[in-house]
Amino acid sequence: EAGVTQSPTHLIKTRGQQVTLRCSPISGHTSVYWYQQALGLGLQFLLWYDEGEERNRGNFPPRFSGRQFPNYSSELNVNALELEDSALYLCASVQTMGRQPQHFGDGTRLSIL
Amino acid sequence: QKEVEQNSGPLSVPEGAIASLNCTYSDRVSQSFFWYRQYSGKSPELIMSIYSNGDKEDGRFTAQLNKASQYVSLLIRDSQPSDSATYLCAVRTSGGSNYKLTFGKGTLLTVNP
C-alpha cells in the first residue's frame, strides 16, 4: 500500500513569491491535514480537509490556504512568502471514522531567501 | 486550550538501558493516544497507538495509559543508538467527527553507545 506522498521534496523561494505544495493521501483516506514545522519547533496545525471541505484551520494568516480535490488529494498554497515561512511542511492522512492515527508524508522542505 | 505536555529533554540514556518518555494531556474526554518518532529532518513515524487504560507492548516498546491521571508514557527497552530521535506524543482531543490530533512539542532522546 502506497503511503502519503508529497511534492516537491524541496523548494527554494524568495520573499513575496507564492508556492503550491501537493499531497496525495493513502488510498481510502478521506481526510488530509497540513502541518508546519519550523526548525527546532513542534508541529503546528495548519489546515484540515475532509470530503473536499475545509473543516478546521490553525492560527495562521489567510495567505495560507488550500483545497482538497474529489480524489482526496490536496494542495497547500502560501502567498506573499515571508522569511519565517521557511519550514518543513507535512501532510498527513487518516480515515475519517474511527480512532485511526494520522500517517505522514515525507514533507516538503521550503526555504525562503 | 487543549494541551499536550512533554518534557523537551534531552533525555540521555546508555545503550541497553530503558528509556522512559512521559506525556500529560488536559482534555479529559480524549480517547486515542499515539506516539510518533521523528528523526532529525524527517517526518514523524507512528510507532504506537493506545486506546485503553493499561499497558500495550510491541517489541521493545511499551505504551502505558492512565486516563484518570491524564498520563501516557512510552518505555523503550534495550535502547539502541538508532532509537535516538525526537518522540512526539499525540492525543485525539475531541470525539465524534471532529477528529483532530494535538501534538506535544516532543522529547529528544539520545542513546549513547
Image (cartoon, coloured by chain):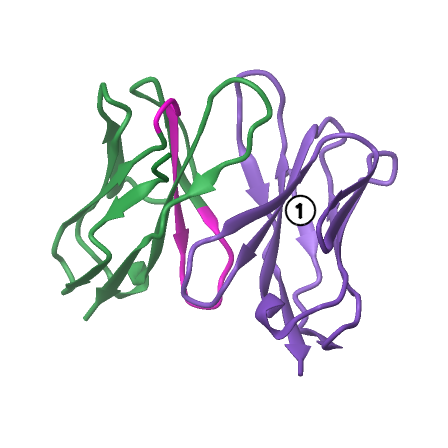
Chain colours: A green, B purple
Picture layout, residue B82 above or below residue B4? below
Picture layout, residue A91 above or below residue A50? below
Question: Amino acid under label 1?
Answer: Val
Give the labeled residue for mark 1: B4
Q: Nearer the viewer, residue B71 or B62?
A: B62
Bin the neighbour count of mark 1 within 10 Å (Cα to Cα): few under 14, some 14-19, many 20 and up.
Answer: many
Is residue A57 shown in magenta?
A: no
Question: Where is the C terminus of chain A found, in terms of image quarters?
Answer: bottom left
Is residue A31 shown in magenta?
A: yes
Q: Is residue A56 left or right of residue B32?
A: left
Q: Quadrant of residue A108?
A: bottom left
Q: Is residue A11 left or right of residue A101?
A: left
Q: Going by the picture, which residue comes out furthest to the bottom? A: B113
Q: Going by the picture, which residue comes out furthest to the right? A: B68
Residue in view at x 30 percent, y 59 percent = A85
Residue in view at x 67 percent, y 75 percent = B111
User: Where is residue A13 drawn, in percent x and y?
Assistant: 15, 63
Q: Which residues are magenta?
A: A27-44
Picture layout, residue B42 above or below residue A43? below
Q: Nearer the viewer, residue B47 or B32?
A: B47
User: Where is residue B68 drawn, in percent x and y?
Assistant: 87, 34
Residue in view at x 67 percent, y 81 percent = B112
Question: Where is the N terminus of chain A found, in terms of image quarters?
Answer: top left
